[in-house]
């Protein structure tokens, strides 16, 4: 009772016992960030002599574009990325930004045939990496094949702990219904990992982010949403989505958090979610007009170089930190 009374006094009188500030946690599908070096993966189209004529000048411009977006975010704590070829391309992003000087990089090479991976940048001046790994699974069916891993990292932040997961679920190639089993497989593996964490502690702070190639109302994202709280909704942005397909906007890029992210204490110095802070960023330079429609300004339209940013819009949430 005494504790409740003291908390009431803190809230009522607006007494801030511990200075709090806000920071962002962001995710961005950067659209085919390949280097110009011939690798072991199937990257032929993204080479200087390939069909996309992927030159060093275009690669440098792409790096600059990604950093322009990052510079608009509110002091990011985590930045999840997908559609990156390898750790090198993310290091090139990091090394060409003064804002990312203190950031660490978490990446594992996946078995995806095209070499498409996910990665996580984190502020190592605030977060200490305690443990990391990846969830690797094969797609169902007779012609089972490898796909992108789910990346995870467990971090200590002063006296707090937070777990970040970065996803890029299988595409809708062949149609949504035909390919849905692939994303359900990804969801089942993600859910198994989440369940294992929450079984240890229901208060675990989990941030799940990624391009799920599914809408919030589809079966696979809903499987994760049974345990985590979706933060990116149509009202999070000006267009109601992160991706435009056949002149329709919808959400493919998601951030979800565990209930523990919403718990606050009057006295403990803890990370906590800023309610209703989910945002789909639509900076003017990320958009263009195409056939009378406002769409993301992408790097390529087929094999035609457009010189834009990405076919997806970035998403973020805000958290209070001590």
Image (cartoon, rainbow, N blue to C red):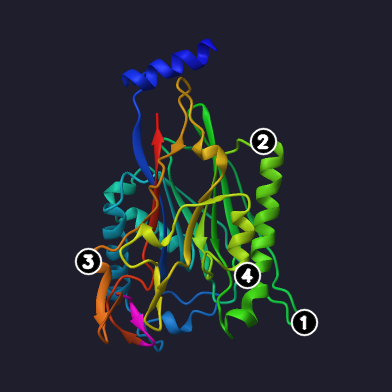
Mark 3 vs 1, N-terminal side: 1
- Image location (x, y in percent) of residue 315: 39, 58
**Image mark for residue 201:** 2
Q: Label 1: which residue? A: 142
Q: Label 4: which residue? A: 183
Kindly report the distance in space between the C-alpha atoms of the residues bearing marks 2 and 1.
Answer: 38 Å
- Image location (x, y in percent) of residue 79: 42, 52
**Image mark for residue 284:** 3
Mark 2 vs 4, N-terminal side: 4
Q: In this view, does 85 lie to the left or right of 227?
A: left
Residues in magenta, as a range: 297-303
Q: Nearer the viewer, residue 155 or 253?
A: 253
Q: Residue at x 40, y 43 (%)?
A: 77
Question: Mark 2 near mark 1, Cβ–Cβ under 8 Å?
Answer: no
Q: Is residue 54 left or right of residue 210?
A: left
Kindly report the distance in space between the C-alpha atoms of the residues bearing marks 1 and 4.
Answer: 16 Å
Q: In this view, does 11 lie to the left or right of 282?
A: right
Kindly report the distance in space between the C-alpha atoms of the residues bearing marks 2 and 4.
Answer: 27 Å
Kindly report the distance in space between the C-alpha atoms of the residues bearing marks 4 and 3.
Answer: 32 Å
């Amino acid at each position: 009772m005494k504790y409740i009374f003291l908390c009431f006094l803190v809230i009522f009188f607006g007494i801030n016992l511990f200075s709090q500030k806000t920071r962002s946690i962001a995710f961005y599908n950067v659209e085919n960030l390949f280097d110009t070096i011939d690798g072991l993966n199937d990257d032929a189209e993204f080479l200087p002599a390939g069909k996309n004529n992927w030159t060093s000048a275009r690669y440098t411009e792409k790096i600059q574009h990604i950093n322009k977006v990052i510079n608009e975010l509110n002091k990011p704590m985590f930045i999840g990325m997908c559609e990156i070829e390898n750790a090198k391309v993310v290091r090139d992003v990091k090394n060409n930004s003064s804002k990312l000087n203190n950031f660490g990089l978490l990446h594992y090479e996946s078995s995806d045939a095209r070499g498409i991976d996910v990665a996580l940048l984190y502020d190592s001046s605030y977060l200490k990496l305690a443990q990391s790994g990846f969830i690797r699974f094969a797609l169902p069916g007779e012609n089972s094949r490898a796909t992108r891993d789910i990346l995870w990292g467990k971090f200590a932040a002063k006296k707090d702990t937070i777990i970040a997961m970065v996803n890029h679920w299988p595409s809708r190639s062949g149609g949504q219904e035909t390919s849905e089993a692939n994303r359900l497989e990804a969801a089942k593996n993600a859910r198994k990992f989440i369940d294992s964490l929450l079984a240890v502690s229901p208060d675990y702070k989990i941030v799940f982010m990624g391009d799920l190639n599914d809408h919030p109302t589809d079966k696979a994202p809903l499987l994760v949403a049974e345990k985590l709280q979706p933060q990116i909704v149509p009202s999070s942005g000006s267009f109601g989505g992160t991706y435009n397909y056949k002149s329709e906007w919808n959400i493919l890029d998601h951030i979800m958090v565990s209930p523990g992210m919403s718990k606050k204490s009057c006295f403990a110095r803890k990370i906590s979610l800023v309610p209703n802070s989910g945002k789909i960023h639509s900076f003017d330079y990320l958009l263009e007009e195409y056939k009378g429609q406002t769409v993301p300004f992408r790097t390529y339209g087929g094999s035609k170089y457009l010189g834009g940013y990405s076919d997806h819009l970035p998403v973020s949430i805000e958290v209070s930190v001590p």
